[in-house]
Image (cartoon, grey):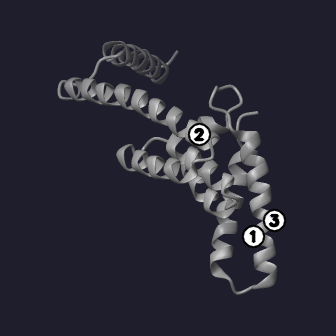
Amino acid sequence: MDRLDRISIWVIVALIISSFVLTGGYKGEAGPGRKAQKRLAIAEVTPANGEVEKNIKVIKNLIESNNLDKAEILVKELMQKFPYEGEPHMVMGDIYVRKQDLLKAMPEYKEAVDLNPDYLDKKTSLFQGKKLKVVVNEALEEVEKRINSDAADKSAKEERKQIYYLKRRIAGSCG
């Protein structure tokens, strides 16, 4: 063994020891300024989820009783109150589907899937992939008819982009 070999071995040993020290020293530890902030974030999320779940149950009962206008008002309030929750967007898409307005449902479903990708994961209880696949295919047919009748319709082309985006997300989802 020459001098270069010995130096490289000592450097490797020093790197291994320093990596163990760094990873072992910070395991599960929050920074001094983040600990209180982290507790506040957890406290905010937990009641919000409970409140959203209660409101969603009420809204779903309204949808089943075919009181779509009142359900839509409640969902819009929820979306303003909890802008980073995916469930209100998913329910709003369901309301638009019930109203037979598939093209308005697409942006809501897109937002719901962006906020919570578990809607496309078969292994979760939130899975909505089959429903979304059917609705997306029907909406695509509707948009294609609009584009075929008026090729200069830019809004239809934008809607088609959203539909293709959802199709890609559904195709690339777990399962």
Cβ atoms at labels 2 and 3 below 8 Å apart: no
In front of the other: 159 or 73: 73
Q: Residue 104, percent across and down?
A: 61, 62
Cβ atoms at labels 3 and 1 below 8 Å apart: yes
In front of the other: 33 or 167: 167
Q: Residue 8, percent across and down?
A: 46, 22
In front of the other: 87 or 151: 87
Q: Quadrant of the C terminus?
A: top right
Q: Is residue 4 left or right of residue 123?
A: left
Please state which amino acid type lies under the numbered disc 3. Answer: Glu
Q: Quadrant of residue 107?
A: bottom right
Residue hosting label 3: 141
Check disc 2 and report its element: helix, strand or loop.
helix
Rendered residue at 43%/48% (across/down): 79
| Number of the front mark, 1 or 2 | 1
| Number of the front mark, 2 or 3 | 3
Check disc 1 and report its element: helix, strand or loop.
helix
In this view, the residue farthest toward the left is 33
Q: Quadrant of residue 43?
A: top left
Residue hosting label 1: 143
Q: Residue 108, percent across and down?
A: 57, 54
Ranked by sequence position, the earlier of labels 2 and 3 is: 2
Residue hosting label 2: 117
Please state which amino acid type lies under the numbered disc 2. Answer: Pro
